[in-house]
Amino acid sequence: MTQPREAPDALLLLAPGCPHCPAVLEGLSGLVKEGEIGRLEAVNIAVHPEQAADLGVRSVPWTRIGEFELEGVQTPGELRRWAGLSGTPRGLPEYFMHLLKNGRRDKVEAMARQAPQRLLALVTLLADAESSMAVRLGIGAVLEEFQGDAIAGVMIPGLGELTRHAGALTRADACHYLSLIGGERIVPYLKDCLADENAEVREIAAETLAEMGAQ
């Protein structure tokens, strides 16, 4: 029998005079009453500035729901959505998509350095046909940052599977991202791509293998 998902806890940093803080506090309080959030801690950073300093928070409202950190004003619907996603398989991919769309690639990179397994969320995003070009470019930028770093190696099996995806764009992206990760483990996947029906996929695979001296 499947265990019920545990409701996440939430933390809100607020300050006197903040025009948006009361609305976020009200939204979170409503979710506590409904059981969507287990516990809410609200901290006035004018009284406890050390809390903001410890978390690197520079503006309020700042909200953490489970593993998700949200900056600025959040509607009741957005708060409910993140509370519902917390602790689910879809949660981290959705959060990374949110960060990449909002230019917070640095946050994705920091979270990946803390726990490299989180990079598997990027593989999930790549497999999603609905992922925008901005998200795909963001994934590439993250991997460029980790180029030559063993951290990204966790993505190789998943990206290898995506080199056989039905969509040519996804296959091409998977090949490109594998090329950024590098290492001998990517060679079998790229060699298979040399026979791909799509010219771009074949070209990326061939160029990468040639650079590696692995053809």
Image (spheres, rainbow, N blue to C red):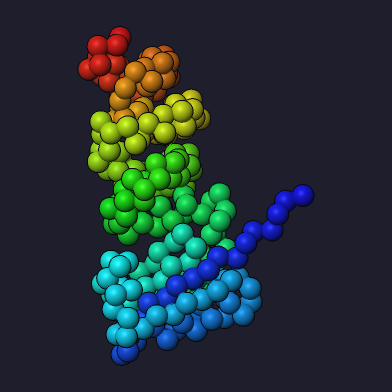
Q: Residue furthest left?
A: 211
**Position of residue 40 in the picture relative to residue 141 (left or right):** right
Q: Quadrant of the C terminus?
A: top left
Q: Residue furthest bottom?
A: 17
Q: Residue furthest right?
A: 1
**Position of residue 136 in the picture relative to residue 37 (left or right):** left
Relative height, residue 167 to residue 135 (above, below): above
Image location of residue 63, percent across then percent down: 41, 71
Relative height, residue 42 to residue 171 (above, below): below
Residue at x 44%, y 80% (from the top left corner): 42
Instruction: Inspect this view and state whether residue 171 appears.
Output: no
Residue at x 53%, y 59% (from the top left corner): 86
Instruction: Inspect this view and state whether residue 19 appears.
Output: yes
- The quarter holding residue 178 reads top left
Q: Residue furthest top?
A: 215
- The quarter holding residue 125 reads top left
Image location of residue 8, percent across then percent down: 55, 65
Image location of residue 152, percent across then percent down: 35, 35
Image location of residue 81, percent across then percent down: 53, 65
Residue at x 29%, y 16% (from the top left corner): 209
- The quarter holding residue 200 reads top left
| Number of numbered discs | 0
**Position of residue 189 in the picture relative to residue 34 (left or right):** left
Residue at x 47%, y 32% (from the top left corner): 158
Relative height, residue 131 to residue 9 (above, below): above
